[in-house]
Image: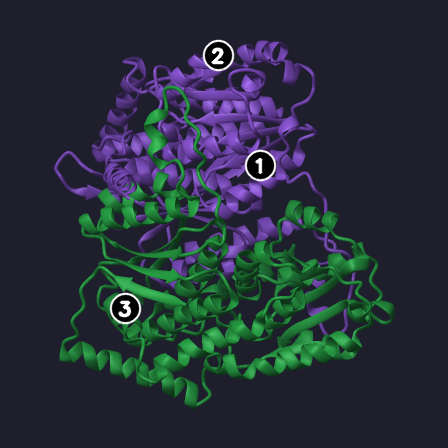
Chain colours: A purple, B green
Amino acid sequence: MLSFSRDFSFDATATQQRIMDDALLAIKEENESGRIGYYTLPETSLALIDELEEYRKTNALIAGGKIKDIVIIGIGGSSLGVKAIDSLLASKSESAVTLHLFENSDPVNISQTLSKLEKESSLFIVISKSGGTIETTSIFKTIIAHFDLDLDAADKERVLVITDAGSSLSKFADSYSIKQFNIPDNVGGRFSVLSAVGIVPLTLVGYDTKALLSGAGEFLDRLFSGEEKHLLEKACYYYENAKTLSINILFSYDNDLENLTKWYVQLWGESLGKIDSRGSSVGMTPIGLIGAVDQHSFLQLVIEGPKDKTVTFITIDDFENDLSIPDVSLRHIEKTDFINGKTFNELINAQCAATRQSLRDNAVPTDGIRLSRINEENIGAMIIYYELLTSLTGSMLKINTYDQPGVELGKQILYKNLETN
Amino acid sequence: MLSFSRDFSFDATATQQRIMDDALLAIKEENESGRIGYYTLPETSLALIDELEEYRKTNALIAGGKIKDIVIIGIGGSSLGVKAIDSLLASKSESAVTLHLFENSDPVNISQTLSKLEKESSLFIVISKSGGTIETTSIFKTIIAHFDLDLDAADKERVLVITDAGSSLSKFADSYSIKQFNIPDNVGGRFSVLSAVGIVPLTLVGYDTKALLSGAGEFLDRLFSGEEKHLLEKACYYYENAKTLSINILFSYDNDLENLTKWYVQLWGESLGKIDSRGSSVGMTPIGLIGAVDQHSFLQLVIEGPKDKTVTFITIDDFENDLSIPDVSLRHIEKTDFINGKTFNELINAQCAATRQSLRDNAVPTDGIRLSRINEENIGAMIIYYELLTSLTGSMLKINTYDQPGVELGKQILYKNLETN
């Protein structure tokens, strides 16, 4: 279960009510017209889980119990979401299968990841929506050479492709009779974690992806049927203050949430950093922090620096870990003994509460998302919460939330430079 | 070797020249008066390395070759710098000693780190400048209980303390005859990585800390003797544009630089986010990005979003890794074959160059720091570069760069809440 709270006041005026109504209508229209596809994934991706059931039986390597390492080759929207979810669930999983990621062109990083893998236990999943991502293709070729994969014969079962139907990568898979799953055309990379991009690897690693989808679906249904109004109000508050509260911090009190904050950074930054319909640059800057660590780093700036930030706290009610501060008293540091006997679960949540109070006292707008515990259902709800918040805010800002025209120039320059050198 | 370049123009006017002269004088005065101590660390910390030589001989556990795990218990300024440097050097190190860190009150994280350690091979280093950091004390007690450490007898050699002379932690160490190293009073936590805080653990792990100090010392000497003027100019540019270019991105094209960007975030954010002498909130927001990954995430916002950002690129000329894209051609994705034969070292640096060019074309002020390679000397120079840039900018902003009054309120609330519950 997720519960929500906020410290900034928001009493909707008639105008604000209209802005919120319009935005909700707009995203419903995106869904109903089929223009934007992520809204239907909680339903449509269920079919993937059935298909995977079948695939597991027919792929001799998986059926034979050989596969212990699911290896993703993907970058950006093709890796951030899967990584975020795996980071949260890995420590509780009893599955013998481990996820690995190749997601950068850094040679040292690629070499290190290669050295940890063995061909016999690995299934390689190449993920690229467009099919032509330069890092992904280059690393895939390196893997083929390193493990001497014979794609025309024995090793075609060791590779899986996730891409748009009709992409060059899709044609490649067809040509080698390699199994592929497709990403719907109308689902963008950064909104794709509940499509095959996330569901296929996460299911193969052994997570309860049905619960992930149902957690997302239930939250979405509630919003679409007029509940969860706080989300609309938050979008409206962000939209109206976009110029003055231009930095939106996600402050997560759980180490394992760090990769979720990176997923959020892509989603929020790439979706909302745009030129709007009037030709103006808009966009809010997302920042991910981890508590309590960043109380000792970034917090000073939030408290005393320019008042241009909002802060959303994520906390876990029950870490399902009862590690406590033992009843040890040390000479000269007895003054910290008052904390003996408390659990670290209590301590970290008390640290969050105190930090939030100190921000409130310093007029920084804050809100909170509490997860009852870390599980697939709650993660699914949190994923769709942020996707919906992004779509609503983007609609209010009158931008195209779903494209990324700004990054094309760099790609063109890269191709030109590499081809002529 | 480090080399520097920039794409924004800066032709100093007489006023700007005076601002830069004043700032350089101000930090020289901080040094000469002894008010701020980090400037002398490249010299004074050499004595620590000699002291450690002796300590290694007299500590029976180390002398006996038993210690394979250096375990730091510390948070914020007591861990970020060490972690940053270790992350860069670990993959090249031939040392059999590994660094571990306890740096958050997250119960799952603490349990996981505990489960990886064995008492017999571990040396525990407790680091807290003030001596009373709640996370550090709580985790230290947990370690004592978990490993059944007897500090009054056998295990006193298994613990090392790094703290200010006279702190409660220092008195604790004295009382149990536990070896301690002290942090100079005039060296703040986030400027302390070249003090005992960093030098002691890094030396024990096996890095060339003399080279680290000499890299820092040489850069500092050059600045103080009137060279490296680009640093003064950069500080002046940041200072003059602090309100409009309020976000400063460090975009590092090397996975292993991620923890250095976190160290930078603390240094820049906590030092410059302040209430200035006129009572106004000032401060610039630091953000760390990793290339090429974040080209697929944050870049769109930088290109098309509000023009409130500067970007500094860090690149490594020579990764000392010749992994290359093999000459593999795959049906239907042949169009990427033009890159076959290039090294990933070339690819990632070409990606950086293309991204930088695309930012330049979009009027985003950028500059670059090139490291010839990753080694202690270059890391030392980069550390002091950022410390000096912070001090110079802080001096121009007329703030106290070295305190952090804003975080005290949260601590008070925490203590009150915990004591009364």
Disc 3 from disc 2: Cα separation: 56 Å
Q: Residue at x 19, y 43 (%)?
A: A281
Given the image, on which type of amino acid does mark 1 rest?
Answer: Leu
In the image, B137 versus A125, the foreground residue is A125
Question: Residue A372, can we see it?
Answer: no
Q: The C terminus of chain A lies in which quarter of the figure?
A: top left
Given the image, on which type of amino acid does mark 3 rest?
Answer: Lys
The chain letter under disc 2 is: A
Disc 2 from disc 1: Cα separation: 34 Å
Quarter assignment of residue A414: top left
Residue B277, relative to residue A365: is it above or below?
below
Secondary structure type for disc 3: helix
The chain letter under disc 1 is: A
Circle 3 sits on which residue? B234
| Viewer-nearest of discs 2 and 1 | 2
Given the image, on which type of amino acid does mark 2 rest?
Answer: Ser
| Viewer-nearest of discs 1 and 3 | 3
Mark 2 / mark 1, whichever is N-terminal: 1
Q: Residue at x 35, y 30 (%)?
A: B336
Q: The N terminus of chain A lies in which quarter of the figure?
A: top right
Q: How many marks overall?
A: 3
Q: At which x and y percent is residue B348?
A: 39, 46
Q: Residue at x 29, y 73 (%)?
A: B397
Dots 3, 2 in contact, CB < 8 A: no
Circle 1 sits on which residue? A88
Disc 1 from disc 3: Cα separation: 40 Å
Secondary structure type for disc 2: loop
Circle 2 sits on which residue? A177
Secondary structure type for disc 1: helix
In the image, A125 versus B279, the foreground residue is A125
Local crowd size for mark 1, using a 10 Å CA cut-off: few (<14), some (14–19), many (≥20): many
